[in-house]
Every structure is written in structure tokens, then in C-alpha cells.
Image (tube, rainbow, N blue to C red):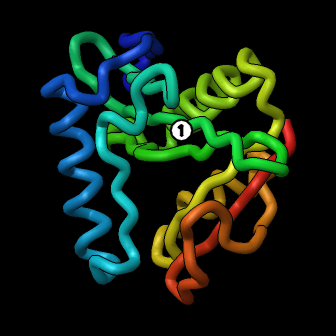
């Protein structure tokens, strides 16, 4: 991130045009890497309160990254939050933006008393895989409505 612009994290409506533009870039990237059956794009409504939270990271007036968490409380199982729609512009990658967004989303979970974070990502995203491993996420099996997919990697972390 540019040294003269301080990153600013703030809640963001996932339906906002800037958020939609970032998500469209993310979808284009994912669609270039994986077949449609291996992409799991969460609609904006799934990331709004009370069942979710969505945050943006701005550099100046530019929305440089976004990410959300969807809250799950399966009967008879511990509640968990699923990290969804994490995406950072190329110009902000490798500079801590995704790490800041992940910390904020994990904070959302902890504020709700949820101590398990889970996510699904793909095998063709080495930067994402590295980030999640550095943050303490460990591989797990499919969860929720996911099926085993050789193109998917499932992660979880106890917060």
C-alpha cells in the first residue's frame, strides 16, 4: 500500500457499487481459474446483518479490498463463521491489506462469541493459501454445504 495513504477499515454494504465492482473483479479472476461448479460466490444478502458482516479497506478514496463473514449455527454443532468474498486489488497485494481484513473479520466472530473461522479457497491461488497458513489456518474437510472438490482447499482456525 502506498506509504502516503493510511489504510482505513470500515463496515461496507456488500451491495454498494464499489463493493460490487470489487466482487465482479474477484468473480472474473475465479472464473478464469476454476470451472463454474467449483466457484461459490456468496450473494450480497448473505453477508448483511444479522447473518453476516462485510468490511472494506480504503486507501484514500479507493476501495482497495473487501471481505465478509457469514455466521453459521448448525444444530448440534459449534457455531462458526465462514470467510467469504475476500479480495484485494492487485495494487494493494503483498502489503498487508488481506491480513488486516482477515483480522477484522475474525474480530467480528469473536464479538459474537464465535470461536471457529472456516473458509474455502482454490488450489490455483498460492498467495491465498500462503496467507491463510501464515494466519494459523489448518486444512480441514468440506463443511456446510460444500462437497469434496479436488480444486478446493478447506481451512479452519480456532480463534
148 sits left or right of 94 in the view: right
Quadrant of the image containing the C terminus = top right
The foreground one among 96 and 38 is 38
The foreground one among 157 and 7 is 157
Quadrant of the image containing the N terminus = top left
> In the image, is residue 40 above or below residue 83?
below
x then y, percent, for residue 60: 28, 11
> In the image, is residue 27 above or below residue 94?
below
x then y, percent, for residue 74: 71, 48
User: How many dots with numbers?
Assistant: 1
**Residue drawn where x is 43% and y is 11% of the image:** 10
The foreground one among 130 and 48 is 48
Q: Which residue is mark 1?
A: 70
> In the image, is residue 111 above or below residue 143?
above
The foreground one among 147 and 32 is 147
126 sits left or right of 58 in the view: right
Q: Residue furthest bottom?
A: 150
**Residue drawn where x is 47% and y is 14% of the image:** 9
**Residue drawn where x is 53% and y is 38% of the image:** 70
x then y, percent, for residue 35: 30, 83
For label 1, count other residues whose C-alpha is less than 10 Å away and answer few (under 14), some (14-19) or many (20+).
many
x then y, percent, for residue 126: 54, 69
26 sits left or right of 24 in the view: right
> In the image, is residue 16 above or below residue 24?
above
The quadrant in which residue 148 appears is bottom right
**Residue drawn where x is 25% and y is 58% of the image:** 27
Q: Residue furthest front?
A: 75
The quadrant in which residue 5 appears is top left
Element carrying mark 1: strand
Amino acid at each position: 500500500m502506498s506509504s502516503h495513504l493510511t489504510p482505513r477499515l470500515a463496515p461496507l454494504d456488500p451491495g454498494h457499487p464499489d463493493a460490487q465492482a470489487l466482487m465482479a473483479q474477484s468473480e472474473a479472476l475465479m472464473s478464469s481459474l476454476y470451472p463454474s461448479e467449483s466457484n461459490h460466490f456468496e450473494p450480497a444478502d448473505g453477508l448483511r446483518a444479522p447473518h453476516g458482516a462485510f468490511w472494506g479497506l480504503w486507501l484514500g478514496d479507493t476501495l482497495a479490498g473487501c471481505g465478509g463473514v457469514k455466521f453459521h449455527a448448525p444444530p448440534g454443532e459449534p457455531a462458526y463463521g465462514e470467510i467469504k468474498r475476500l479480495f484485494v486489488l492487485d495494487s494493494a497485494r503483498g502489503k498487508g491489506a488481506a491480513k488486516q481484513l482477515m483480522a477484522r473479520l475474525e474480530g467480528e466472530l469473536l464479538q459474537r462469541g464465535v470461536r471457529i473461522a472456516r473458509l474455502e479457497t482454490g488450489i490455483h491461488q498460492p498467495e491465498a493459501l500462503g496467507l491463510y497458513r501464515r494466519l494459523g489456518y489448518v486444512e480441514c474437510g468440506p463443511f456446510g454445504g460444500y462437497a469434496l472438490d479436488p480444486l478446493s482447499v478447506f481451512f479452519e482456525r480456532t480463534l
